[in-house]
């Protein structure tokens, strides 16, 4: 029999094991100041740097965070010394628990359909570029393959696609699914802009959207969330419209924010205080990748701070990697609550589900998906974090089970299908071979634990 090499990581997120409540935070991660090509109204506003831009954003309504993502190259106005200075200004302006001031970059160009702008956070004051003397980390212009590989290999970094479409990032939809790129990219916006708006009445919404491209990437197999950007080039931070990127996190800290973004716990909303509770089987939230023996039951609650009722709530679904666009599988009208069970799900096929809400005033909300595999042999729900790094093989196993993990000094516990502990071992190196030849054939679960917390769980079969 051929052996399957399975590269899949299972993580019980911290808030599951500790009953952590997730809160809703509203903001924007795509904005420029005069350190590249933003603050175009500086002559009249007097604001020409990140310090005053963050101060302006803190006074905007229903706004909890602002990420400034200056263009990364001199053609768009960026000088590496300003990048360093902007990072320092962001650190000084940041108020953990009150308002997050984040510092990133907008990498790339939009010269042709293979190019595109990538919003990147997590490299601190290091600038990624291609111009002599104007970078800390070199990536050649338009070399997105090298860029995504650098992001994938840095666990503290995330990126998403700014204003993507078929005229940009065309290679993602025209080529086969790429797991490396998927590991680097956490999302794509379904709305962006209007980038050059000078309106501060919260009512100037972008006319276009990237919803079709979002669905195309999901059909290819990419595990990405749905976001929202303003792309400010004038001093309008948080005020050109009421659209928001909404992030679900335990509290408003930089660490929790990064955790939520990397795990796709976010959605895009035209409404600045709409809270969407989207779950499967009562526990799995948007962004989760789940294996369970039960039929997926989806529940959605739309709770708008202004009392608006949803004109419609739709559940979109598709088969991951099929190349077939998702379709609407359930819809309710004039209701803030939806419940739907997918009784026709095929065993061991990964499906994804996401929510689209249209409010009575026409404002839209698009959620990140939940990816769900129904496996009748799984006795517990397993959660997958695509950013973790665990390799367990072969599966099925005859003699030696090999484990490679990005963590070190962790405990390994293996249970049989009844929950009985059959093996326990400690590994200090990150790589270990376990002799499993003496154990009976059947289904087992391996837990990787560190400091009393379960980090990873995976099912495997012993022949």
Image (cartoon, rainbow, N blue to C red):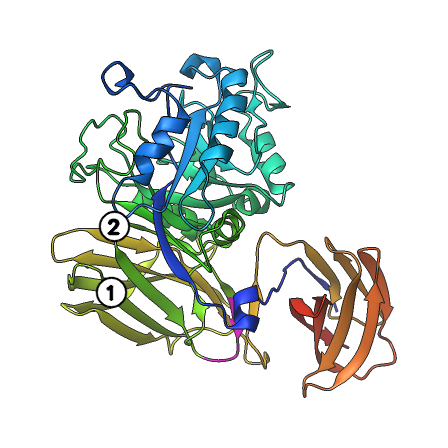
Q: Which mark is residue 303?
A: 1
Tell me, yes or no, whether the highlighted magenta stretch contains residue 291.
yes
Left or right relative to 324: residue 437: right
**Residue at figure coordinates x 40%, y 59% from the top left:** 369
Badge 1 element: strand
**Percent position (x, y) of residue 14?**
57, 65
**Residue at figure coordinates x 69%, y 57% from the top left:** 390
Magenta stretch, residue numbers: 290-294
Does residue 433 sit above or below 323 in this rendering?
A: below
Mark 2 lies on residue: 272
Tell me, yes or no, whether the highlighted magenta stretch contains residue 185.
no
Q: Quadrant location of residue 65?
A: top left
- The one nearer the camera, 148 or 171, is 148
Give the mark nearer the N terminus: 2 vs 1.
2
Q: Main secondary structure of the magenta part?
A: strand
**Residue at figure coordinates x 13%, y 67% from the top left:** 334
Badge 2 element: loop
Label 2, label 1: how far apart the Cα atoms are: 12 Å
**Percent position (x, y) of residue 115?**
44, 27
Q: Quadrant location of residue 131?
A: top right
């Amino acid at each position: 029999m051929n052996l399957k090499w399975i590269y899949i990581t299972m993580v019980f997120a911290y808030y599951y094991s500790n009953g952590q409540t997730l809160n809703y935070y509203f903001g924007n991660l795509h904005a420029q100041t005069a350190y590249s090509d933003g603050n175009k109204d500086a002559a009249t506003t007097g604001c020409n740097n990140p310090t005053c831009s963050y101060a302006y954003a803190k006074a905007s309504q229903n706004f909890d965070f602002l990420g400034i993502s200056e263009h990364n190259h001199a053609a768009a106005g960026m000088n590496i010394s300003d990048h360093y200075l902007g990072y320092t200004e962001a650190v000084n302006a940041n108020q953990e628990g009150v308002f997050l001031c984040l510092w990133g970059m907008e990498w790339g160009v939009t010269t042709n359909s293979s190019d595109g702008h990538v919003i990147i956070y997590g490299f601190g004051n290091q600038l990624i570029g291609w111009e002599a003397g104007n970078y800390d980390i070199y990536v050649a212009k338009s070399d997105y393959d090298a860029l995504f590989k650098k992001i994938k290999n840095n666990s503290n970094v995330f990126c998403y696609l700014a204003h993507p479409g078929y005229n940009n990032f065309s290679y993602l939809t025209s080529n086969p699914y790429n797991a490396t790129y998927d590991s680097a990219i956490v999302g794509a916006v379904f709305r962006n802009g209007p980038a050059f708006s000078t309106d501060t009445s919260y009512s100037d919404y972008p006319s276009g959207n990237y919803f079709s491209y979002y669905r195309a990437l999901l059909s290819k197999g990419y595990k990405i969330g749905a976001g929202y950007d303003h792309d400010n080039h004038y001093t309008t931070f948080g005020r050109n419209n009421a659209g928001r990127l909404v992030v679900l996190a335990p509290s408003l800290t930089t660490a929790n924010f990064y955790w939520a973004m990397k795990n796709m716990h976010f959605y895009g909303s035209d409404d600045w205080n709409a809270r969407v509770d989207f779950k499967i089987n009562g526990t799995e939230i948007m962004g989760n990748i789940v294996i369970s023996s039960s039929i997926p039951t989806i529940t959605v609650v739309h709770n708008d701070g202004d009392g608006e009722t949803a004109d419609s709530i739709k559940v979109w679904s598709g088969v991951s990697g099929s190349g077939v666009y998702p379709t609407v599988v359930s819809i309710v009208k004039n209701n803030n609550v939806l419940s739907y069970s997918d009784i026709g799900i095929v065993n061991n096929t990964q499906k994804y589900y996401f929510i689209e809400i249209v409010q009575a005033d026409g404002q839209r909300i698009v959620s990140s998906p939940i990816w769900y595999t129904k496996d009748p042999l799984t006795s517990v729900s397993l959660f997958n974090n695509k950013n973790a790094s665990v390799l367990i093989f072969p599966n099925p196993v005859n003699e030696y089970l090999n484990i490679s993990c990005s963590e070190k000094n962790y405990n390994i516990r293996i249970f049989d299908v009844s929950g009985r502990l059959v093996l326990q071992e400690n590994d200090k190196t990150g790589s270990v071979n376990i002799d499993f030849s003496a154990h009976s054939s059947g289904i087992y679960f391996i837990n990787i634990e560190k400091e009393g917390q379960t980090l990873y769980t995976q099912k495997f079969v012993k022949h």
